[in-house]
Amino acid sequence: MKVVYTDSLVIGGGLAGLRVAIASKNRGLDTLVLSLIPAKRSHSAAAQGGMQASLANSVKSKDDNEDVHFGDTVKGSDWGCDQDVARMFAHTAPKAIRELAGWGVPWSRVRKGDREVVVNAERVTITEEDDDHGLITSRDFGGTKKWRTCYTADGTGHTMLYAMDNKAIELGIPVHERKEAIALIHEGDRCYGAIVRDMITGELIAYVANATTMATGGYGRLYSISTNAIINEGMGAAIALETGKAPLGNMEAVQFHPTAIVPAGILTTEGCRGDGGILRDVDGYRFMPDYEPEKKELASRDVVSRRMTEHIRKGKGVESPYGPHLWLDITLLGREHIEKNLREVKEICEYFLGIDPVKDFIPVRPTQHYSMGGVRTTPKGESPALRGLFSVGEAACWDMHGFNRLGGNSVAETAVAGMIVGEYVADHCLAHDVDIDIGTVRKFFDREQAKIDALLERTEGENVHELKAAMQQVMMDKVGIFRKGGPLAEAVEELKALLERSRNIVVRAKARSANPELEQALRVPRMIKLAICVAKGARDRTESRGAHAREDFPDRNDRDWLSRTLATWPDDDALEPELNYEPLDVMRMEMPPGSRGYGNAKTIEHPDTAKRVAEVEAITASLPDADRHEIQRALMSYELPEKYRGMNERSGVGTA
Amino acid sequence: MTTNGQPKGRTLVFNILRFNPQEKGDKPRMVRYEVEEAPGMTIFIALNHIREQMEPSLQFDFVCRAGICGSCGMVINGRPDLACRTLTTKFPEGEITLMPLPAFELIGDLSVNTGEFMRSVAERVESWIHSEEAKAPDLDVLEERMDPDTADAIYELDRCIECGCCISACGTLRMREKFLGARGFMSVARFMADPRDDRTDADWYEVIGDDDGVFGCMTLLGCEDTCPKDLPHQAKIAYLRRRMVKA
Ligand SMILES: Cc1cc2nc3c(=O)[nH]c(=O)nc-3n(C[C@H](O)[C@H](O)[C@H](O)COP(=O)(O)OP(=O)(O)OC[C@H]3O[C@@H](n4cnc5c(N)ncnc54)[C@H](O)[C@@H]3O)c2cc1C
Ligand code: FES
């Protein structure tokens, strides 16, 4: 048995994983990153639109600060997030962006003087102040009060990931590429690393570590059409689930992005609408203002996606061989703007649709985009059930997004969580020893080897591609944007039947070494387990919150459902997870539940809400001379690593 | 016409190099597959179809399938390009030959190991900001200002996706094993343009001032011709050379 020892094992070489690795390395720990692919190819590179941080440099973002960013994030989450975490995040985001500026990201900058922009389909001139010239600028995004999304043209994720990976290379952090973690090593309440398959040689290797960080990205590929990279199959969450101990949080919270192209499902960034693009129907009519008079195309994603679907259901979609779609119109932004700030969008339109978005409308429809759910962690990023197991980025349910994440808040989360959790990972490594018996490692190693042997030996059985396609179709048809009890119940049963069948997969390709069919055969049963977690969570949550929209329960029900779903997998023979619910404590909330100000849902109030609202008012009133920081601390204290506690300076206002 | 009323597509012929160096005794060979063309079909879609329906062991790499991540470089009818964004309609004769990118270690079939190569380029160029300040920045204060045009100009050179097309199209690299190649030069140009980086021309001379560096380039311009991101390789190599002559 080949064994590799390290202090800090990071599974995943996207933005989140690399940032944790950098933190570990900077604290003097032996650190190692595993990735399916070269780190720079991770899906983080695909983020086009930008990263939210309340720098407040541009004239349209003046008066922005942590409080406003926190408020937008909580509303976006439909009060489903952990407010402590949202605070940790909003406070650290400006530091993350400044750190990345130091590491080389060429953030687009404020240019003093007049500038033409499109707001609400009209050209207006805004004037940037001389004092702000050369500071990092930002654009508008959905669900935000201020222009807060910082960007590099439309290659934000790319430039961030390159800067992050280059930093990791500078520090000499090894990235073991084409290695797939297929099981976690654990005993009692402690995680000790992972069993890993070399995707070239097929060899299994045990990576034994003091801390193991799951940074494996989202599970978008449970759906047949998704904006996600095709490697986003949720394996990190799945192998955590398979420990039978670590719970997954809010798996039913799946975001659909309003504007992916039809049919390929490739994303056109929210920056298209942020910069002034609008949505039109079959008649060329701009319909969003009818539904959302205030935020229009820039309500939060869950809301815009539902409105588009409603409008298509009214017969206003454009028919196509791939089903109905709507139009995204960015022609009003003009050639110069599109070729500079939306070039990636232009390339995608040219290559995949054969159209020029400077002149033509883009066919779009809401498409699976983001996984709010994932490995449940504490605010320190650690699994509540398995010590030494951490998770960050899209793989995690750290829980700053609740039931809907805001555009631009995800790459921001990867960098911020990487910084914060990275420190806690290092603290853990420095405080604990690895006390595992090699026999335990061997047990996991042998178990995984036996699974592979059995797969390669089986001569008759199920076709893995068929099972996967069937699962993806169930998810599309029955666990999509709008959900209903009946179809959800069917989905759970159909997926369970698929899981049973997946225990009898036969692979036609028999190589032990690089073998794409074998890889899928190892993943698909795990993907089906995740799909069941999503479907069952959605079936049982009889309310609508954020991206989880039940037609039979259209109200947000704080009274019964202000809680986080926790899914654990009982044992290998089980066909469904156990679901438990972790209540959110209204009496601790800095921002008690209220209205989002967009979307039309009613709310059934939580019994504590009125009490907490009064309490918040009383606390605020009792501090007439306090500044916003003092009031914030009085309302809800939260933790942060020492080095990130400093106040953030802003142009013209200092730290006020 | 097929049953759903769509016209039946052409029959495309794919000739694909098959070879798994991990399996003892396996030898490189060309294998022919026939695929019915569908509307909007890309090579990504066609290869997955072949793998799911005909050849489960076929190896190839796609990640973003949107022309963004650089995973899917391969030689398509003699030309290195991104397979995911290549529509099959581009080939009127309906015959498509696919080979792995040369110049990289072959993993199997159409899959090559670009990762190790690109990391070695990053290490050689030291593709990170060199400055004392960047080592311990104060994250609580206003970021350093940068001229907006400078930021835009850096981004223009930072758009490389490390697909490897330029490397496999490089005539010089075939003769000079240690030649840095266009990817490396673009990276040098990018950090030279960055005011946050303290390196001087003398420092850069150490990296690219010889025949394995910018003086070795035979100006065959395979890089310029094949770069899927249309990066200005020719202009930048010429620029680096002029600067290094003076250094
Ligand atoms: C098209 C698109 C555009 C987006 N645009 C934006 C945007 O503008 N702004 C924004 O904020 N967010 C955006 N997002 C979301 C954001 O990009 C992602 O949520 C974020 O980048 C995820 O980063 P990550 O580090 O968590 O995971 P990823 O970048 O997905 O990295 C996952 C890593 O895990 C590795 N891995 C996975 N499984 C295993 C395993 N079993 N063993 C070993 N390694 C494994 C992979 O190799 C990879 O390195 C966008 C998403 C998409 C799909
Ligand atoms: S798969 Fe990402 S560029 Fe082709």
Image: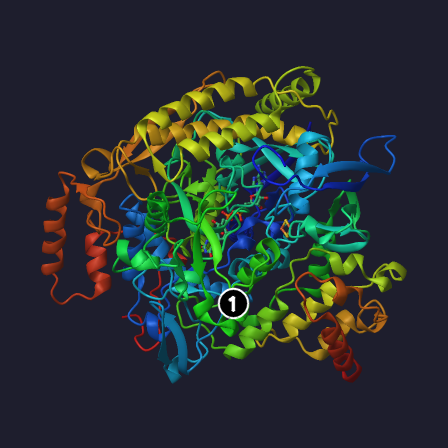
**Residue under the point 74% across and 81% down:** B243
Give the side of residue A102 with respect to residue A493, left or right.
right
Residue A400 appears anywhere in the view: no
In the picture shown, does residue A144 fall above or below A421? Answer: below
Colour treatment of the image:
rainbow
**Residue under the point 74% across and 34% down:** A201
Give the side of residue A80 with respect to residue B145, left or right.
left
Question: Residue A597, position in %: x, y?
Answer: 23, 54
**Residue under the point 69% across and 15% down:** A459
Question: Residue B61, position in %: x, y?
Answer: 68, 44
Of residue A191 and residue A432, the one placed in the foreground of this image is A191
In which quadrant is the C terminus of chain B drawn?
bottom right
Q: Residues within 10 Å of mark 1 (few under 14, many from 20)?
A: some
Give the side of residue A509 with respect to residue B150, left or right.
right
Q: Return the residue found at the far right.
A: B175
Give the side of residue A159 with respect to residue A143, left or right.
right
Q: Which residue is mark 1?
A: A358
Tag 1's secondary structure?
loop
Q: Amino acid at mark 1?
A: Val
In which quadrant is the N terminus of chain B drawn?
top right
**Chain where mark 1 sits:** A
Of residue A80 and residue A222, the one placed in the foreground of this image is A222
Residue A158 appears anywhere in the view: yes
In the picture shown, does residue B138 fall above or below A41? Answer: below
Question: Residue B237, position in %: x, y?
Answer: 75, 73
